[in-house]
Amino acid sequence: MVEGYNSGGLLVRFHSLVGFLPFPQLSPSHFCQEPGKGVQEIAKGLPGSLISVKVIQADEENKKLIFSEKEAVWSKFSEKISVGDVFEARVGSVEDYGAFVHLLFPDGLYHLTGLVHVSEVSWDLVQDVRDILSEGDAVRVKIINIDREKSRITLSIKQLEEDPLLETLDKVIPQDGSDGPDSLNPNNSSNIEPLPGLEAIFKELLQEDGIDDVGITRQGFEKRVVSQDLQLWLSNSPAINQKFTLLARAGRQVQEIQLTTTLDQEGIKQALQRVLERVP
């Protein structure tokens, strides 16, 4: 039972004990139900209400009892989510490194909060997250990682959109195999010289368990130089016959790489991370 509040949080009674619930430990549902209201305004309406809490500190000697509604909600709802799930959501705070986003559950409440890192906001280069997202915005997000030990959820907005690299590649290299104005014949993929640095990556990839073959399938040239540095992505396209697509780009060149593997998408990402740590 919420008995009252002060400048820092709520006073909560549990049987004969009264503990403290700091405002940062409130569930995000309060803020999403009443968007635009400050935490003090929200607190005014809570005395007399029953909330679920988890004890996060109990110091009998100093008579200190600290509660968390956020942790109680995590205990209840974190088991109901999985990597790959898509949620309607609402943006909470926006920071330099990303945005904290509250997930909407079927009961109509926002129980859990995750982080959309700046790199997962858009396929375009994002200099300032605030140029794209604002507090209160309604968004759709995909869960890409769950750290149950640290009670953290990692989210992505861009992974719900078509990978623009695939679209770019299909524009410079026609899918039907005909030669575009700036493309090389995909049937002569063995003649394609790998972008600088790719050969070393290919060699290391083949040392990874579960990866059977890797090779360039198509190449094309863009009209503009995006970056002279080698950039490598794992496409979001699903595997076909255990073949995944990687995309490499440097300067104007774009190359499609086919990876034959028994690994799933997450396994490939981990293998790539290990390889890139080994390759200078």
Image: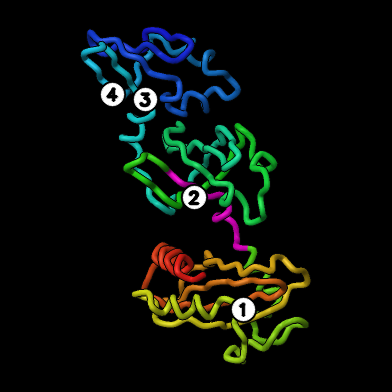
Whether 98 is drawn above or below 197: the answer is above
Q: Do tag 4 and tag 1 residues touch (Cβ < 8 Å)?
A: no
- The quadrant in which the N terminus is found is top left
Residue linked to disc 3 = 69
Q: Earlier in the sequence, mark 2 or mark 3?
A: 3
Residue linked to disc 1 = 195
Dot 1: few (<14), some (14–19), or many (≥20) neighbours within 10 Å?
some
Distance CA(mark 2)–CA(mark 3): 24 Å
Find out whether residue 279 is within the magenta segment. no
**Could you tell whether 46 is left or right of 68 in the image?**
right
Distance CA(mark 2)–CA(mark 4): 30 Å
Q: Earlier in the sequence, mark 2 or mark 1?
A: 2
Find out whether residue 160 is within the magenta segment. yes
Q: Which is closer to the viewer, label 1 or label 3?
A: 1
Residue 172 in percent (x, y) is at 71, 76
Q: Is residue 187 visible?
A: no
Which residue type does callout 1 highlight?
Answer: Leu
- The image quadrant of residue 20 is top left
Q: Which residues are magenta?
A: 153-163
Q: Earlier in the sequence, mark 4 or mark 1?
A: 4
Q: Which is closer to the viewer, label 3 or label 4?
A: 4
Whether 80 is drawn above or below 279: the answer is above
Which residue type does callout 3 highlight?
Answer: Glu
Which residue type does callout 2 highlight?
Answer: Lys
Distance CA(mark 1)–CA(mark 3): 52 Å
Which residue type does callout 4 highlight?
Answer: Val
The residue drawn where x is 56% and y is 36% is 91
Q: Earlier in the sequence, mark 3 or mark 4?
A: 4
Residue linked to disc 2 = 142
Dot 4: few (<14), some (14–19), or many (≥20) neighbours within 10 Å?
some
Q: How many marks?
A: 4
